[in-house]
Amino acid sequence: MGEEVELIKEHLNVADVIGEYVSLKPAGANFKALCPFHAEKTPSFMVSPGRGTWYCFGACNEGGDVFSFIQKIEGVDFPAALKLLAERAGVQLTGQTRSHSQRQRLFDLMAAATRFYHEILANRSAGKRAKKYLIDRGVKAATINDFQMGYAPNVWDALQQWLGRQRYAVDEMIAAGVVGRSPRGKLYDRFRGRIIFPIADTQGRVVAFGGRVTPGRQQDDVGKYINSPEGPLYEKRRVVYNLQRAKQALRGGQPCVVVEGYMDVVLLAQAGLETVVATSGTAFTGEHVDQLRRFTNVLHFAFDADAAGWKATVAATQAALSAGMKVATVVLPAGKDPADLVVENPEGAAKIMQASRPLTSLLLEQLRASTETASQEDQLKALVLLAGRVRNPIQQGAMVQEIAQALHVPEDRIIDLLRQAQPVQPALNVEPDIDGGAAQPDLDVLAEHQLLGLLMLNRDVRKALFPYLEAGFLLDPNCQALYNSMHQIAEHKTSFFTMSGDELVGDFDVALVPLAEAIRARAEELLGTTSHTPLQEGRLLLRALQRRSLKSRLDALQQELMAAGEDSRAKALQRFQTLAHELAGIDNS
Ligand SMILES: [Zn+2]
């Protein structure tokens, strides 16, 4: 398998692959982007085509190669990532594992079932009534094709018979969830007399079906909608309906519109709204947010305008805010679902779905309109709960202000409620930030990265500056680990100062390699944007870190001086003067 991996890496440019998921900006020989794995405003995600690697310097602090990227972003295991990239690279795989090919057979089975159902709806007399119903509801024939919609005939074993002729085993049909076995051992098609919506993963492979009863069919013991049971292919918490189609449009930065039903999605997409999705057979959860976050950070919820829909909106908004997403609510006319709107006004519907309002302001409006005290209290709590989920302190502060003003309640009261709601970690930073913002530490870490990167990259810089770098100059634990590694190599190998960057990184502990690679890329980025030589750049960085370290030691000493007794003060004062002198020396050089 190792050879195949290398071959695939040779055939693919990591930037091309990653560029399909995130928008990359050139930075020297490398690329920068907003990290797709965590919410952020300034790019800390780096891609280095030269090395075939990626790294997130932000919250993830993690990196790897094109395989680990695909595994992480597609939520698949290594064999699946291998297969995906092999296809892309045009590399023939020989050493596929058995479990992988079993899984592939289930995907093939689902594709075959999709074709079967679709053929019946599109062309057979058994599907005539269902097709007429769909056309009457405004679904065009082309849309039925696009979404591969189908019809499951009202027979106990139609699919089972057909799949049997395609040489699929009963166990495979059961594993895929299309055939069930009764307690008495009788086999039955799970979907009967239903319109079929194939549900695909983000790679476009069908993993489940949603089935809607056709009108006129007796509905005594059957739900309006049923879904495939969970199994090896389908985890309903993680699957978002239509995301495989919406993801391309989402990369343009458009908001993702989340609706409740498959029909809503189909009709809105037909009306030209490309970025519409729905959950499948379950409430919207944090795991759905994780899926969507790979492609967008803006969600518009457009749930039905009834009590249940309202509750779902609040819950979904909380889940999305917790993940740092921007969230808004689409206000639908009372009693209407998105599908109704499309039928009434196809052009206007897409517009309504994209115009949205922050949920806070909607809740506030309701609150003002409501007269019962109990419900006011409930809604205040809902508002506070929402505000508590907002990660960004500035956004949260604005929300608190908005709530306080609207309700004529002091801001302190809201903040108190917030604290009660989240005793563990109050998300609200009420202390004024005297030191001038939280961006500072990041800049410092950047300097540490750049200097270490230069030391790896360039032998002259290493020879001239490494002896002057001290562990105490570095605050970032990752940088300290890298420094210690370099220090050890320097002690044990006389060739330390003449090694190439690759040789040096090859000597690091394996666990440090992705970080080391990414840090080298950061230094390359720096060199691509400066007119200084690497050595000049290295000197500036070393000096800045040295200065920072001295300053913090001076601060500590100052504290010590204030607390010191007569005799120890003299000594501390002496040290203080030495350090101050050193600091002046750096600043003048
Ligand atoms: Zn990240």
Image (cartoon, rainbow, N blue to C red):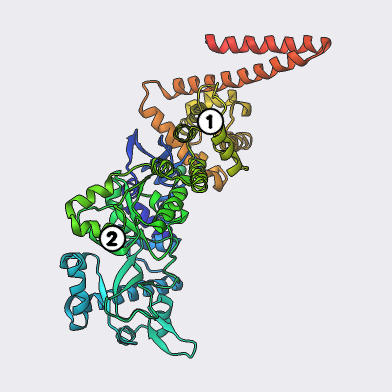
- Residue 280: quadrant of the picture: bottom left
- Quarter where residue 208 is shown: bottom left
> Percent x, y for residue 118?
24, 74
Name the kind of residue labelled 2 in the image: Asp
Q: Is residue 220 visible?
A: yes
Res. 459 mark: none
Please, is residue 286 above or below residue 327 in the view? below
**Front one among 230 and 504:** 230
> Circle 2 sits on which residue?
264
> Dot 1, how many residues are within 10 Å of its Cα: few (below 14), some (14-19), or many (20+)?
few
Q: Which residue is rendered at x = 16% and y = 68% of the image?
A: 141
Please state if 102 lies on the left or on the right of 142 as rendered.
right
Residue 493 visible in image = no
Q: Nearer the viewer, residue 384 or 380?
A: 380
Viewer-closest of 431 and 90: 431
Q: Residue at x 64, y 11 (%)?
A: 580
| Of residues 412 and 430, the one drawn nearer to the viewer in this rendering | 412
Q: Is residue 270 left or right of residue 439?
A: left
Check disc 1 and report its element: helix, strand or loop.
Answer: loop
Q: Amino acid at mark 1?
A: Pro
> Can you tell which quarter of the image residue 308 is in?
bottom left
Q: Position of residue 12 (x, y in %)?
A: 32, 52
Badge 1 is on which residue?
410
Q: Check the picture and name the quadrant holding the N terminus.
A: bottom left
Vertical placement of 532 versus 367: above or below?
above
Q: Position of residue 530 (x, y in %)?
A: 37, 23
Q: Are marks 1 and 2 in contact (CB under 8 Å)?
A: no
Which residue sits at x=33%, y=65%? Answer: 200
